[in-house]
Amino acid sequence: MTSDDVQVSDETTEAPPAFSLTTGRTQGYHRAAVDTFLAAARTAFESDADDLTAADVRVASFPLVKGGYVVAEVDAALGRVEDALAARARERAVRSNGAGAWVEQARDDAQVILDHLARPRRQRFARTGFLTFGYRIDEVDHVSTRIARYLRDGEPLTAEQLRSAAFRMQRGGYREEQVDALLDATVDVILAVR
């Protein structure tokens, strides 16, 4: 057997990619980084360990490279992992503290969000300086109104819609970290009441 034969057999035993790959100039998530993270997530979930939370999955990020995994496919998979971890956390909390305590906590969290969003439009979050870019105020206010309607009136809104929310930038816009924190808190509430 020659070294060429060994190389050929290595290539034939290589597992197919877990997700579609980007082509051309389009960048995707670094394959090894995604595979490593998802393997760790699977291990944590199957071992019933608390090493990984839904919030950890939500903030996961990966380098962008040519020939990487298609971003939308990975993000959808991460959303499913986050949902599964949140459901497990909910089941554990209900088992240990009772359903009433879980619902009360979700209600309290929702009220904190509603109190924040009760501020007047264009004043719901701190602003960046005039020379610094932040999230577009009108776009964030639109999403904020949808969140308030969901929490107050029960209008439809999904965790996936919030996960995929993207805002253009503007000078003097809303501070990104405040907006992102509120979106994360809202996703937590949505997952808690599913």
Image: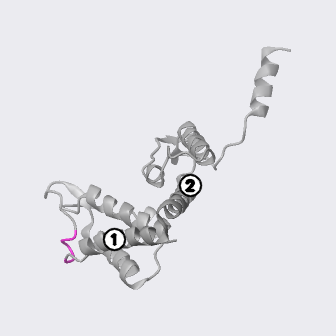
- Which residue of the protein is positioned furthest toward the bottom in this rendering? 153
- Which residue of the protein is positioned furthest toward the right in this rendering? 1
Give the SS element for disc 2: helix
In front of the other: label 2 or label 1?
Answer: 1
Instruction: Say which quadrant the N terminus sits in.
Output: top right
Give the residues in magenta: 120-124
Can see residue 161? no
Residue at point 36% right, 63% down?
185
- Foreground residue, 55 or 140? 55
The spot of residue 117 in percent (x, y) is 26, 74
Three-letter code, disc 2: Val
Disc number for residue 62: none
The spot of residue 126 in percent (x, y) is 18, 62
Three-letter code, disc 1: Asp
The spot of residue 103 in percent (x, y) is 44, 72
What residue is disc 1 on? Answer: 108
Res. 173 image quadrant? bottom left
The spot of residue 78 in percent (x, y) is 54, 54
Q: In the rendered structure, are the residues bearing label 2 and label 1 in contact, judged by CB atoms less than 8 Å apart?
A: no
Sequence-wise, the earlier of marks 2 and 1 is 2
- Foreground residue, 20 or 141? 141
- Foreground residue, 33 or 27? 33
Q: Going by the image, does 111 lie left or right of 160?
A: left
**Does 149 lie within the magenta span?**
no
Crowding at mark 1 (Cα within 10 Å: few <14, some 14-19, many 20+)? few
Can see residue 57? yes
Determine whether 32 is above or below 2 in the image: below
Residue at point 30% right, 70% down?
113
Residue at point 40% right, 79% down?
150
Q: Going by the image, does 100 lie left or right of 8?
A: left
What residue is disc 2 on? Answer: 81
